[in-house]
Image (spheres, rainbow, N blue to C red):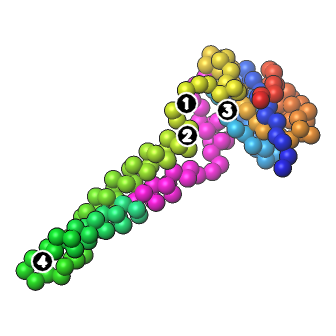
């Protein structure tokens, strides 16, 4: 496997950043992070290319909740032998309520846990690629490339208006 180099480019103007992002996307390079002093819908639209896997984690939690709720209800009925006026020992219809409640409970818990894990929260320190100037008036992009592409990508970023391009470890 090739080792990758991470380049961080600092931009003064939003238009330059957007042009650079389009150029990087055209070359199918991995963009790790884009920092901006204010939220911007154009940056979000350019970066939104894949759906979050949190939805599958939530679905797994919901299915596990249904199975757990129904299993707990069946186990309780079999353990305590609840026989009410000739009904079957494991009536399915009343256990739908418990299954639904467990489905919602587990889906919410799995959603929160998946969200925290995939966003790597909580963060106790700033990443090495963070530049404090982006909280004031600058924009930055962190892109990954091979060592052979380093000069080419660095030149591409500068041509698109990057104020400076640094290698981030």
Name the front one of labels 3 and 1. 1
Name the front one of labels 4 and 1. 4
Residue 58 drawn above or below residue 76:
above
Q: Residue tagged by mark 1?
A: 123
Q: Which mark is residue 44?
A: none
Q: Which mark is residue 83?
A: 4
| Prevailing secondary structure class for the magenta stretch in the rendered image | helix
Image quadrant assignment for residue 27: top right
Q: How many marks?
A: 4
Q: Residue 54, image x and y in percent?
A: 51, 51
* Closer-to-camera residue (96/51): 96
CA neighbours of label 3 inside 10 A, class few (<14), some (14 to 19), many (20+): many
Q: Which residues are magenta?
A: 37-62
Q: Residue tagged by mark 2?
A: 119
Q: Which mark is residue 34?
A: 3
How far separated are the C-alphas under marks 2 and 1? 9 Å
CA neighbours of label 2 inside 10 A, class few (<14), some (14 to 19), many (20+): few
Residue plotted at (72% across, 31% down): 141
- Circle nearer the N terminus (4, 3): 3
* Closer-to-camera residue (159/32): 32
């Amino acid at each position: 496997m090739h080792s990758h180099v991470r380049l961080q480019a600092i931009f003064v103007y939003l238009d330059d950043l957007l042009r650079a992002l389009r150029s990087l996307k055209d070359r199918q390079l991995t963009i790790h992070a884009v920092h901006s002093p204010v939220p911007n819908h154009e940056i979000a639209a350019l970066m939104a290319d894949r759906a979050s896997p949190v939805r599958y984690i939530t679905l797994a939690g919901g299915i596990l909740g249904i199975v757990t709720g129904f299993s707990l209800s069946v186990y309780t009925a079999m353990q305590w032998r609840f026989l009410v006026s000739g009904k079957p020992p494991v009536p399915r219809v009343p256990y739908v309520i418990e299954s639904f409640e467990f489905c919602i409970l587990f889906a919410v818990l799995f959603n929160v846990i998946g969200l925290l894990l995939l966003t790597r929260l909580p963060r106790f320190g700033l990443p090495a690629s963070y530049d404090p100037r982006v909280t004031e008036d600058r924009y930055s992009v962190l892109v990954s490339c091979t060592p052979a592409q380093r000069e080419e990508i660095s030149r591409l970023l500068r041509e698109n208006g990057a104020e400076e391009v640094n290698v981030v470890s």
